[in-house]
Amino acid sequence: MKHLFIRTSTTEQEPTLQINDCCRAFNLSTYTLIQEKDSAYKETAKRVEFEKLKKKIANGKVSELYVWDLDRLFRNRKKLIEFLSLCKIFNTKVFSYNQQWIQAIQKLQPPFNEIMFDFMLSIMGWLSEDESLKKSNRVKLAIKK
């Protein structure tokens, strides 16, 4: 069962770009769309649709998960790694439009695939956290001015 997870941070953002990019890149014609319009940065954010997705994964109902970018899942490195570990435990393959390296790493022989995946994931998670913090600081500076 293929699932496409789309998250936009604000209600003003349009998810069509993410959906079209993923469908084209991964040749998706049938899938279950899970859409969320919430920030993944705030600790207090209630991500109802994402929690439903996690339950589906834990129940073995998601064989493939497609996302436009890993930061659509989480911008917090530790939470992203935790989520992808959940996917690994329940044999859910994750594909990302903006991180095509995931598919390349999956083709490596064990244990190198896991070593490289963990390494790249740590780097990408750190970059996402850093970018999110910079963006937040820019917004705060703009509000002050």
Image (cartoon, rainbow, N blue to C red):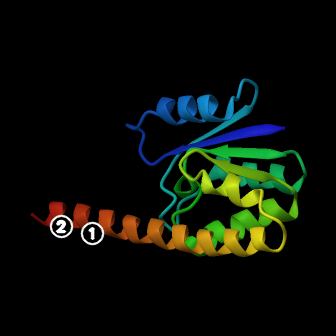
Residue 92 % position (x, y) = 82, 53
Q: Nearer the viewer, residue 48 or 91?
A: 91
Q: Of helix, strand and loop, which one carries label 2?
A: helix
Residue 60 visible? The answer is yes
**Residue at the farthest front position:** 109
Residue 41 % position (x, y) = 48, 63
Residue 76 visible? The answer is no
Please give left or right for residue 131 compared with residue 18 in the image. Answer: left
Report the quarter where the N terminus lies: top right
The residue lying at 49 percent from left, 73 percent from top is 126
The residue lying at 77 percent from left, 73 percent from top is 112
Residue 61 % position (x, y) = 87, 45
Badge 1 crowding class, 10 Å Cα cut-off, few under 14, some 14 to 19, many 20 or more, is few
Q: Are marks 1 and 2 in contact (CB under 8 Å)?
A: yes
Q: Which mark is residue 75?
A: none
Q: Report the residue marked by disc 2.
A: 141
Q: CA distance from mark 1 to mark 2?
A: 6 Å
Report the quarter where the C terminus lies: bottom left
Give above or below for 32 relative to 143: above
Give above or below for 41 relative to 36: below
Residue 72 % position (x, y) = 54, 52
Q: Of helix, strand and loop, which one carries label 1?
A: helix
Q: Nearer the viewer, residue 81 or 44?
A: 81
Q: Quadrant of residue 29?
A: top right
Please give left or right for residue 86 compared with residue 20 in the image. Answer: right
Please state which amino acid type lies under the numbered disc 2.
Leu
Q: Which mark is residue 137?
A: 1
Badge 2 crowding class, 10 Å Cα cut-off, few under 14, some 14 to 19, many 20 or more, is few
Please state which amino acid type lies under the numbered disc 1.
Asn
The residue lying at 50 percent from left, 50 percent from top is 38
Give above or below for 29 relative to 86: above
